[in-house]
Image (cartoon, rainbow, N blue to C red):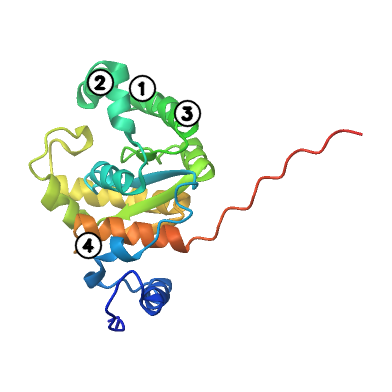
């Protein structure tokens, strides 16, 4: 449990912000910060940070959180699955059924490559399987700050048990499929992520606040060194 000092002004309390920062570094993020934290936390430095990229299992909330985080940071939200469907002219499920997963992953790889270069200031929500190809993981980590939204298979099942849009979860035991996907993908999400945010028991506003806090605590990126002229 985190104990915060009492103060009369969120804006004027350096003591409060220091306590929050120390708590975050210990991995303790008090639920009380959820509704008010955006008033206290300055966004200095985040406007110049490179692309923010959300990865995680299907149903982890990547698209919803990307929209809210983008609004908070005055950035553009981008959903890679949405871009893919626009390009294909049909739903991902329909394309899966006609062409198979390998063909879909080829399109996804191309779209990930384009989006991570063409929109460097966006908040990008990726598809749940975007990390399956190693080239995608390398590009995501090198070109952006990657945030893994971790949800357990049991949490995901509660959210997705009536969802008919996700091709890999259709037919058979959906919970077992989620457990199998999680076992396969969790190490891959961690492999490319700069930090992990557990979604368990958190509201949308709390998750956005926690992400902003973690971004603020990240060390600044070193300035790029201009190339030296040949003698």
Neighbour class for label 1 at 10 Å: few (<14), some, many (≥20)?
Answer: few
Residues tagged 1 and 4 counted as in contact (Cβ below 8 A): no
Relative to residue 34, is residue 145 drawn left or right? right
Query: First in sequence: mark 2 or mark 3?
Result: 2
Residue position marked by numbered label 4 in the rendering = 200
Residue displayed at 51% across by 38% down: 139
Residues tagged 4 and 2 counted as in contact (Cβ below 8 A): no
Q: Is residue 199 visible?
A: no
Residue position marked by numbered label 2 in the rendering = 95
Please determine whether, in this image, residue 129 is positioned above or below residue 92: below
Query: In the rendered image, which quarter contains the C terminus?
Result: top right
Relative to residue 16, is residue 63 drawn left or right? left
Distance in Å between CA atoms under marks 1 and 2 = 9 Å
Query: First in sequence: mark 1 or mark 2?
Result: 2
Query: First in sequence: mark 3 or mark 1?
Result: 1
Where in the figure is residue 98, as x and y percent of width and height?
24, 17
Farthest left residue in view: 162
Residue position marked by numbered label 3 in the rendering = 118
Distance in Å between CA atoms under marks 4 and 3 = 33 Å
Q: Nearer the viewer, residue 129 or 78?
A: 78
Query: First in sequence: mark 4 or mark 2?
Result: 2
Q: Nearer the viewer, residue 161 or 197?
A: 197
Instruction: Give the quadrant of residue 76.
Output: top left
Residue position marked by numbered label 1 in the rendering = 103
Instruction: Tell me the SS state at disc 4.
Output: loop
């Amino acid at each position: 449990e985190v104990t915060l000092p009492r103060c009369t002004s969120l804006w004027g309390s350096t003591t409060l912000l220091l306590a929050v920062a120390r708590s975050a570094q210990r991995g303790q993020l008090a639920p009380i910060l959820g509704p008010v934290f955006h008033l206290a936390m300055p966004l200095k430095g985040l406007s110049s940070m490179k692309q923010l990229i959300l990865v995680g299992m299907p149903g982890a909330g990547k698209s919803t959180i990307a929209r809210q985080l983008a609004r908070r940071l005055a950035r553009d939200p981008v959903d890679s699955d949405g871009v893919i469907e626009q390009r294909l002219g049909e739903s991902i499920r329909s394309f899966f059924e006609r062409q198979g997963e390998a063909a879909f992953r080829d399109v996804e790889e191309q779209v990930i490559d384009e989006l991570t270069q063409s929109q460097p200031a966006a908040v990008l929500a990726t598809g749940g399987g975007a990390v399956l190809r190693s080239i995608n993981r390398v590009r995501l980590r090198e070109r952006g700050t990657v945030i893994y939204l971790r949800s357990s298979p049991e949490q995901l099942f509660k959210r997705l048990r009536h969802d008919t849009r996700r091709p890999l979860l259709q037919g058979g035991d959906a919970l077992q499929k989620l457990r199998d996907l999680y076992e396969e993908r969790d190490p891959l999400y961690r492999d490319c992520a700069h930090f992990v945010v557990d979604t368990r028991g958190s509201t949308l506003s709390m998750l956005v606040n926690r992400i902003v806090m973690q971004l603020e605590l990240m060390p600044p990126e070193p300035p790029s060194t201009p190339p030296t002229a040949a003698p």
